[in-house]
Image (cartoon, grey):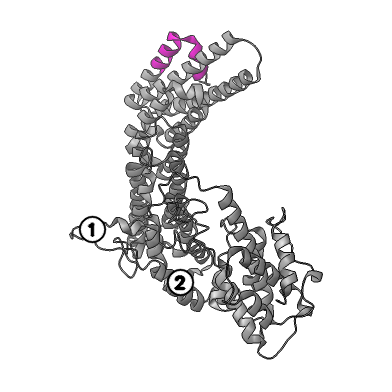
Amino acid sequence: MSLFDSAHKAANNQINSATAYEDNISLLSAAELPESFTLEDLYRDLLSDERNGKNDEDLRDALVLASCLEQTERLSRQDGDEDWRGKIEVWLVKEALPDGKVFTVDESLGKYADFKKYPANSSTDDKTPEKELKAKQYRYKYTLLLTSLSNILSLRVSPTTPPSDPTLLSLICYTSPKAPWNTSQSHTLSTTLLAPHKEYLESPAFLITYLLQTFIKPLFSHAPRPTTITPAARKAASSSAPPRHFDFRENHPENQPWRSGVPYAMIVLEWIVGNIDPSLLRSTAFPLLIPPLLTLLDSPSNSIRMQALSLLLPLFPKLSAPLLTQTGLASVFQDAISPICLFLPSLTPLEDSVRLLPRAYEVLWGLGGVLFEDSEVPVIASNEKMKEKQKEKQKERIKFYTTILQHSLLPSFLSTQDSPQLLLILLPALSTLVQKLGIYTVKYLKDIIPLLASILLNPLWLISVQEVVIQTLWTLREVMLVGWMRIGRREWRLRVLEGLVGVGGGVRREEGELEREGGKGGERETKKKVLEDVKHEIRETAKVFIVAVRASDDKEIREEFEDELRDVVKADERLGYIFAVVE
């Protein structure tokens, strides 16, 4: 008969209750626990290898252990307690590491998936009641384990010294609220236990030697080193050697443990990026951190790519413009991120494109901001050398943004003309890029103006997705504000006029349809309000257009434009509202 038989019975009853797996767990009461026990009793009866180790028994024993460690007044102390305490800590740390057979951060493997049973291309719905229950049980168990770990750490001879590195690693696994194995209670426990040891956590001994060299590096050791960088994480020189033979087995989850067996690797990387000191990153850590991040960006899993992009946003400011430029990593990252902007249907599922594209452009803007826009306010160059340096930096800036425009953004529009979700991503990205390029946008008016005009002329958007029309008009205004001196040229002027007249006429037709339908239904009033919003944006865009063309130095352009406006209104007086601006 075991010392904990009655506690086991009470634990089983609680685990089988309807409220067992709620976020805030309840421990066993003192009346359900032994009157007295030692750390040796807890280890031998609840944790030793002699137990069967079934999941339901693990959960039961985790609940009993957490409950007993809360009742410190019943804990009998004896010689050798520190050894037993250490054994319990080691067991807790090992068991608290999230199980890759239950949880994964790779959505292509399922939210809760044993990747061997449910491969990425499986049509099996992984969110079965059985798997949901298993996930809840594991989250419950992890919360109990961290509760026990909190108490067992307080029993150390010197509680204020940092715990062991493996203990800290297990706690870091729960620092991300979005981790699928986390609960609010386990997240609070981990951050509370880590907080007193901030100095050690940010030290080279822990961050560099343990996390990056001992934990992260071996995980990625079987992945091919990115060919774009050297072993020292500098940009690699171009090679004439034939490309490396691609082995599909490299992408199997078993060979990429961060996707399967060690799902918490992504959380640890996130923690490293968020907590590493910039000076330590630039001096020592970046050669260890950059290769894994580039490997993740090239992952066969779009969800892993998404997480890798999220890591780059806080990383770039810490790397700094000088390091990114001097090592060549700026262009390496741009070349790695830009192709993701072309992950479009039908090769990429629409839902993946809708998530990846905004983040990819956000990261590119972040990289550009660090390289060109986050430096101190420039001073007037006092000598030729400074002037030349500023001129060179401006050339690099324009090259950076024009490369995005030419190779990522404009080609994307060719594949998204029938997708409102993607247009509502790409149009704001184009607005942002136009603002960053400024006057240099005029070189690409030949591509941008026809593109925007064609969207305005598509009647589908005015009928079904008016937000596309409104966003297109906003973007067109941005283009005209920075390129006003060229908008008056005949080819651009007529395309803009065609787009405004086309969408303006479409609004009139839709209003006529509403009038013929009659009634005062809620849907009708909503559509009427939306059409009024579109008309307002058309008028605002027309104002900018007219002012821009009338500002031309070419008298002939101004006269031709006035004739064109009169001809439009004469052909259809209902379109007069578009160009009703102050002379």
Residue at image location 73% in from the left, 60% down from the top: 14
The image position of residue 345, as x and y in percent, is: 38, 38
* The image quarter in which residue 552 lies: top left
* Mark 1–mark 2 CB contact (< 8 Å): no
Left/right placement of residue 458 relative to residue 96 reads left
Range of residues picked out in magenta? 562-579
Q: Camera-side residue: 381 or 525?
A: 525
Mark 1: few/some/many CA within 10 Å (<14, 14-19, 20+): few
**Residue 536 against residue 149 in the figure, above or below:** above
Residue 519's mark? none
Q: Would residue 341 appear left or right of 376 to someone viewing this image?
A: left
User: Which residue type carries mark 1?
Assistant: His
Question: Which residue sits at x=35%, y=54%?
Answer: 336
Q: Secondary structure at mark 1?
A: loop
Residue 481 in which image quadrant: top left
Q: From this viewpoint, is residue 25 visible? A: no
Q: Which residue is mark 1?
A: 245
Q: Nearer the viewer, residue 335 or 186?
A: 186
Q: Please provide percent x and percent y for residue 540.
A: 52, 27
Name the chief secondary structure element in magenta: helix
Look at the image and tell me in which quarter the N terminus lies. Answer: bottom right
Q: Is residue 418 visible?
A: yes
- The residue that mark 2 highlights is 215
